[in-house]
Amino acid sequence: MRIDVIPDAKPAYAGKLLWLGRTYKCVLGRTGATATKHEGDGATPRGRFYLREVLYRADRLDQPNTLLPVRPLRSTDGWCDAPVDPNYNRAVTHPYPASAEKLWRDDGLYDLMVILGYNDTPVVPGAGSAIFFHIAAPDFGPTDGCVAVAGDDLFMILAGCTPDTQIDIT
């Protein structure tokens, strides 16, 4: 099964997500989608990627109903975004000596998130990191390169996902 993400023309970060006969509003990276992703470009990578793992804030949300692997987020969870670090584009534990995004956030965007199988087999330093499918900001502003939908929509989408589901960003 495939989740289709289709960027809109304006603004560059707006899009729609098609899943099981329904259309959802989504947002992409602030510079839109690209086939030539690199670290810090603000773009969402084009391509087809597996949904690797679901993480959620157990202190804020119930565990999502999905057949994907799921685990609660920990306050020390991070994701390395330093291209020269051996753990680039991998989960790390904070405090971490290199640059690493904190996944435990106050703004709620990562209260429910899916790690996408982008640049992970093998990892190419500088080709982009921390590409997730997560909750959109209330104003549906752009992400830094992820795909985001409303929180209730993400719960509904995940309910139909299996380990064979892929997201296809065109």
Image: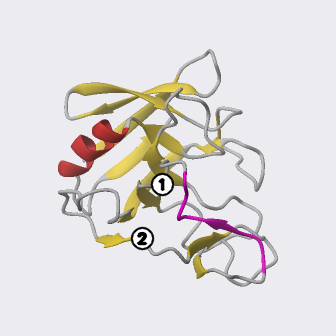
Question: Which residue is rendered at x = 72% and y = 60% of the image?
Answer: 127
Q: Callout 1, which amino acid? A: Tyr
Q: Which residue is mark 2?
A: 73
Front-lying residue, 33 or 13: 13
* Magenta residue span: 98-106
Question: Which residue is rendered at x = 45% and y = 49% of the image?
Answer: 133
Q: Which residue is mark 1?
A: 110
Q: Is residue 110 magenta?
A: no
Q: How many marks?
A: 2
Q: Is residue 99 magenta?
A: yes
Q: Secondary structure at mark 1?
A: loop
Residue 128 in percent (x, y) is at 69, 58
Determine the image quadrant of residue 9: top right
Q: Eyeballing the image, is 134 above or below 64?
A: above
Front-lying residue, 53 or 151: 151
Q: Residues within 10 Å of mark 2 (few under 14, many from 20)?
A: many
Q: From mark 2 to mark 1, how far is it between C-alphas? A: 9 Å
Residue 76 in percent (x, y) is at 55, 78
Left or right: where 97 falls relative to 107: right
Cβ–Cβ below 8 Å for labels 2 and 1? yes
